[in-house]
């Protein structure tokens, strides 16, 4: 090919293979970072939109608590999880995202902090002095030496209770607190069935079950409103002058890619592959299931993987059908290190395919807590296959960044690095 034709193709936007197997027209790291930020803004924007829909369905349910309106609210909660889970690849590499994430998707939670629980839950915990605080039942509560007036359930109160006593499982707000309030505890172990909270837990006056229906309604309303507020704050991080976008675009050269690959690697390995999946599989414990009240975990994990694939490819389709795309980590890596980029692209595709098997099984055969149950060889294998895909994907990320000269640190997990240390 003559140099004239090479120049013409490059000018038309085609990647041109140069000597040594690398491409001649790599996008700039800053352009890749801009696409990454644009996709973040779009994903969080969709998370806000679906959370507002959930807010409307919760309001309708509380105005008329029936089985039908409760079902609508539950379906809206599941729908709201879809775009949010796709954003999780932005964690770990962006400090401002991590600073807000604990108010939105903190997990696991000790649900006795919030409301009534079954006797099998137990009365005390060595790790958590507020294990059965039951804010809904108690207008006065004690945190440490301080007695708190909880007669009015409002945003200030719930925010103050999140991680009360510096115990991470004291999750008072976010998706999973709302999930518990909509479904109640899943008391089925690794058998079929999700939580089955009755709509009458929210009936005002006669017909109220389990008491405190007015306070339970207030808690659900406030927690849902807070979710919309906090997601809106996360979306603002990625606006043109938002803190996360500004911090990213200030990075020089290939350093702008470090947060991107850090997020992808850490979510793949330590967080999703390790703490959310391998730990539960080792213990065969449904309490280690991410969306444990609703049995929505297979979807939650699947959309994490979808989101990572979209971030890598630099392409996201919004809920309204608008496509946000541009120069991506993939196109940059293809230009600089085509062999490693191709391997990583194949690994992303392989993990997504394995996650699709898990999702299909969750929709047609059994829920995720059943898949990880002891003695369920077929279900265990489906989950392990996804874990294996995530681990291999992480190694592929590490191979790419090594070639690119980008330094990252990937979050680890005892469940993967030292499984013998994992105990009940």
Image (cartoon, rainbow, N blue to C red):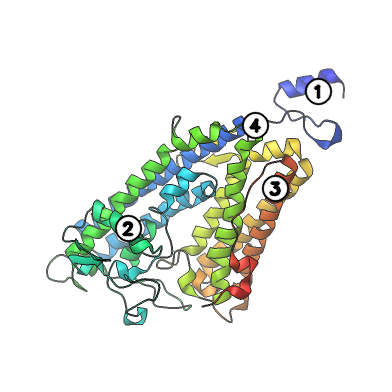
Residue 337, horizontal then vertical, whole percent: 76, 40
Is the residue 273 above or below the residue 207 in the image?
A: above
Measure how far apart labels 4 and 2 are at the Cα level.
46 Å
Residue farthest left in this picture: 205
Name the side, left or right, on which 1 lies relative to 268: right
Instruction: Classify mark 3: helix, strand or loop.
Output: helix
Q: Residues within 10 Å of mark 1 (few under 14, many from 20)?
A: some
Sequence order check: which comes first, mark 2 or mark 3?
Answer: 2
Sequence order check: which comes first, mark 4 or mark 2?
Answer: 2
Question: Which quadrant holds residue 352?
Answer: bottom right
Residue at horizontal 37%, vertical 69%?
110
**Marker disc for residue 73:** 2
**Marker disc for residue 345:** 3
Measure how far apart labels 2 and 3 are at the Cα level.
37 Å
Viewer-nearest of labels 4 and 1? Answer: 4
Is the residue 9 above or below the residue 22 in the image?
A: above
């Amino acid at each position: 090919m003559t140099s004239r034709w090479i120049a013409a193709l490059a000018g038309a936007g085609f990647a041109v293979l140069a000597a040594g197997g690398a491409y001649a027209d790599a996008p700039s790291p800053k352009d890749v970072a801009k696409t990454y930020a644009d996709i973040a803004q779009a994903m969080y924007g969709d998370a806000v939109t679906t959370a507002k829909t959930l807010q409307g369905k919760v309001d309708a349910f509380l105005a008329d608590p029936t089985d039908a309106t409760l079902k609508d609210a539950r379906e809206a909660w599941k729908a709201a999880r879809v775009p949010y889970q796709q954003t999780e690849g932005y964690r770990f590499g962006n400090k401002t995202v991590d600073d807000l994430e604990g108010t939105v998707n903190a997990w696991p939670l000790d649900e006795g902090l919030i409301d009534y629980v079954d006797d099998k839950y137990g009365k005390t915990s060595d790790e958590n002095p507020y294990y059965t605080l039951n804010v809904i039942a108690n207008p006065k509560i004690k945190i440490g030496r301080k007695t708190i007036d909880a007669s009015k359930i409002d945003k200030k109160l719930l925010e103050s209770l999140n991680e009360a006593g510096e115990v991470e499982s004291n999750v008072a707000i976010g998706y999973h607190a709302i999930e518990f309030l909509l479904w109640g505890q899943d008391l089925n172990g690794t058998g079929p069935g999700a939580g089955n909270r009755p709509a009458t837990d929210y009936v005002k006056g006669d017909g109220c079950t389990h008491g405190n229906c007015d306070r339970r309604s207030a808690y659900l309303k406030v927690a849902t409103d807070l979710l919309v507020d906090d997601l809106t704050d996360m979306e603002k991080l990625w606006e043109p002058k938002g803190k996360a976008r500004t911090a990213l675009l200030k990075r020089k050269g290939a350093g702008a890619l470090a947060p991107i690959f850090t997020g992808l690697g850490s979510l793949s390995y330590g967080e999703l592959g390790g703490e959310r999946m391998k730990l539960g599989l080792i213990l065969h414990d449904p309490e280690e299931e991410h969306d444990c009240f609703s049995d929505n975990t297979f979807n939650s994990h699947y959309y994490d993987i979808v989101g990572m694939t979209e971030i890598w490819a630099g392409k996201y389709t919004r809920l309204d059908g608008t496509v946000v795309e541009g120069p991506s980590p993939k196109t940059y890596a293809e230009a600089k290190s085509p062999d490693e980029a191709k391997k990583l692209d194949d690994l992303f595709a392989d993990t997504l395919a394995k996650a699709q098997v898990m999702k299909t099984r969750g929709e047609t055969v059994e829920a995720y807590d059943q898949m990880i149950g002891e003695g369920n060889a077929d279900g265990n294998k489906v989950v392990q296959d996804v874990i294996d895909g995530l681990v291999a994907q992480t190694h592929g990320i590490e191979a790419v960044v090594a070639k690119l000269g980008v330094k990252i640190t990937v979050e680890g997990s005892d469940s993967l690095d030292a499984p013998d240390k994992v105990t009940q």
